Each structure stands twice: as structure tokens, then as C-alpha cells.
Amino acid sequence: MGKDKLFITNNIRKLRFFANEMTQQELADKTGVTRQTVVAIENGKYFPSLELAFRMAYIFKVTLDEVFSYHSEDDPVLAKINKNKTKEK
């Protein structure tokens, strides 16, 4: 893998939507964290412990890699994600 910088992305917002529009507070209650922690994870400002990551996957009934993924700095998938985030602002 070399010295590539890695970025972690997540699909929590989308998974919450498809889980009967689960709120951030509902996810926080189910995982035992605060709503602010869920917000920070969704926004990529905080990365959960492995235990919390697995707990989230279990709640959504998906695999861990359907919740979180990592990409190298030059990954075209990451470039597309960043491009979409720029459009949203």
C-alpha cells in the first residue's frame, strides 16, 4: 500500500434513511452513544471504535464494509465523493 494517505467514508446517512428514516438520535440510542457522536461520525470528523462500527452494521443488518469504507488519496471513488460534497455546499 505504500505511503498513500487513506480516507474513511461512511454510508450512515443513507442507511438511516433506508431504515425507516431512522433519526440520528434513534441510532445514538441503539448504539449507546450521543447524537453528537453520530453527527461527527456521519460528517467524517470522528472515527468510531471497531466495536461501535460493528454495532452500527448489526443495527442496520449489513456488513461492516457497507457502512464504512476506506480509499487511498488517488482513488477515483474518493474523487467522485469529494466532487459530490462540493456540489452540495
Image: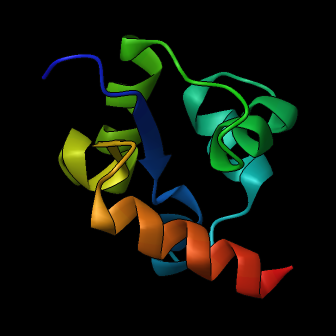
Q: Nearer the viewer, residue 40 or 56?
A: 40
Q: Is residue 65 above or below residue 17?
A: above
Residue 68: x %, y % from top left: 36, 44
**Could you say where residue 89 lies in the image, as x and y percent from the top left?**
87, 79
Across and down, in percent, residue 10 comes to: 46, 51
* Front-most of residues 31 and 89: 89
Viewer-nearest residue: 79 or 36: 79
- Report the residue at 44% width, 38% height from top: 8
Residue occupying the point 12% across, 23% down: 1
Q: Residue furthest left?
A: 1
Q: Up-down: is 34 above or below 29?
A: above
Q: Is residue 36 left or right of residue 43?
A: right
* Left or right of residue 19, residue 87 in this image: right
Residue at (47%, 12%) from the top-left corner? 49
Q: Is residue 32 left or right of residue 16?
A: right
Compared across the picture, whether 79 is left or right of 87 comes to left
Count all numbered tags in the image, as a single digit.
Answer: 0
The residue drawn where x is 30% and y is 67% is: 76
**Location of residue 7 (image quadrant):** top left
Q: Would you place residue 42 above or below residue 4 in this image?
A: below
Whole-percent x, y for residue 28 in the image: 69, 37
Q: How is the image coloured?
A: rainbow
Question: Relative to 6, does residue 10 appear above or below in the rendering?
Answer: below
On the image, which quarter does residue 3 sit in?
top left
